[in-house]
Image (tube, helix red, strand yellow):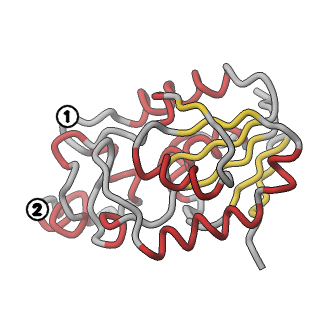
Amino acid sequence: MTYPTIWFLRHGQTEWNRDHRLQGRLDSPLTDQGVAEARRQASLMPPILAAGPALIVSPLGRARQTADIALCGTAYRTDPRLMEIDAGDWQGLRREDILEAHPDLAARAPTPLDIYEAAPGGEGLAAFHARIRDFMQDLQGPTVIVAHGLLGQVLRAEACGLPPEDAGRLSNLQGCVYRLDKGVETRLEAP
């Protein structure tokens, strides 16, 4: 499927990102580094914002905090379909502790997306992908999205025609803007 042009921004580093904790639907504030990353994104946004794209943001606090900075104060709307994957019973736990308690999972050298997929009581990749695809099919034109790392990987994979199982191998950077157009991804970075 072909989607309109998308500019995807992952939220800046949070306290839990720094501590390697699974956030999922829980939240923690941006660190000083995360604020600096959002400011780098803001330096890239004026020509994009000038074109008048739709601006849609995850309702979770870390994404809204990033959007308030990165979108240069421009009004946006939120959509619950942009929330991060639910990590069920593992939300709030450190990645290292999960892998230590589950050596079978650790032995597979899992990506973060693989860990969330394995979480008991979590959303799972199939439901997560279906939610993201439902959101993307509703896009009416060029759109800026501010959301989460794993959501971004799955959304970007979908936009580029990759299977969701391969999404966890895509880059997952903060402080940049991913442009997705006609199945091609370009990463925009501040000088």
- Nearer the observer, 84 or 116: 84
Above or below: residue 110 compared with residue 119: below
Write down the quadrant of residue 69 in the picture: bottom right
Q: Is mark 1 on a helix, strand or loop?
A: loop
How busy is the neighbourhood of tag 2: few (under 14 within 10 Å), some, or many (20 plus)? Answer: few
Compared across the picture, whether 48 is left or right of 62 comes to right
Residue 3 position, x and y percent, is: 77, 31
Residue 189 position, x and y percent, is: 74, 70
Above or below: residue 7 compared with residue 136: below
Residue 147 position, x and y percent, is: 53, 46
Residue type, numbered disc 1: Gly
Which residue corresponds to the image point at 50% horizontal and 44% vertical from the top-left?
151
Residue identified by numbered label 2: 101
Residue 150 position, x and y percent, is: 47, 50
* Residue depth check, mark 1 versus mark 2: number of the one nearer the observer: 1
Residue identified by numbered label 1: 121
Single out the residue that lies furthest toward the bottom. 191
Compared across the picture, whether 47 is left or right of 121 comes to right
- Nearer the observer, 177 or 101: 177
Q: Give the position of the N terminus as an image quadrant.
A: top right
Q: Give the position of the C terminus as an image quadrant.
A: bottom right
Mark number, residue 107? none
